[in-house]
Amino acid sequence: MGAISTGNAEHYGWGETCDGWHLLASDDLSVIEERMPPGTAEQRHRHVKARQFFYVLEGEAMLELEDSRHRLLRGEGLHVPPGVAHQMHNASNADVRFLVVSAPKSHGDRMPAPLSEDAA
């Protein structure tokens, strides 16, 4: 077993221009590093079982939880409990890199979470 990095981890693309690297991929724990270019956002969603922790490594992100928005700077993170609708945004003019730690893994546990009528 050797050290893992974005240089040797399994890579995947998401959205049109975003990247992810599986730093740890097991059924009970997942650690992913992601990169989002300026002006990108993930789809609003929730997880039935997985709890997640988003931690910003570089840049500035906006993490929406239900109907509140949280600005996260480098070195800051936020917990997302199971069942909570959330969406990560990069409204800045620079890339944002962050870790997403999920327990258990979130793959296969994702459900769409459209905006409520009140928030629309």
Image (cartoon, helix red, strand yellow):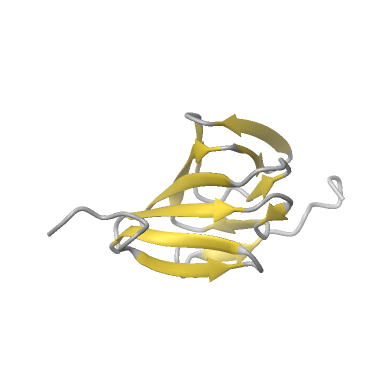
Drawn side of residue 8 relative to residue 120, left or right: left
Q: In the rendered view, does 102 fall on the left or right side of 114? A: left
Whether residue 105 appears in this view of the structure is no
Residue under the image location 60 percent in, 53 percent down: 36
**Where in the figure is residue 40, as x and y percent of width and height?**
70, 55
Depth check: give the residue in front, 24 or 27. 24
Task: Determine whether 64 is above or below 45 in the image.
Answer: above
Above or below residue 24? Residue 97 is above
Number of labels in the image equals 0
Quarter-wise, where is residue 25 in the image? bottom left
Residue nearest the observer in this picture, 81 or 76: 76
Left or right for 44, reference 10 = right
The residue positioned 86% from the left and 46% from the top of the image is 118
- Residue for point 50% across, 38% down: 56
Quarter the N terminus occupies: bottom left
Q: Residue at x 67, y 60 (%)?
A: 43
Percent x, y for residue 28?
29, 57
Could you say where residue 33 lies in the image, as x and y percent from the top left? 43, 52
Seen as rendered, the residue at the extreme left is: 1
- Residue 29 position, x and y percent, is 31, 55
Confirm whether residue 12 shows in the render. Answer: yes
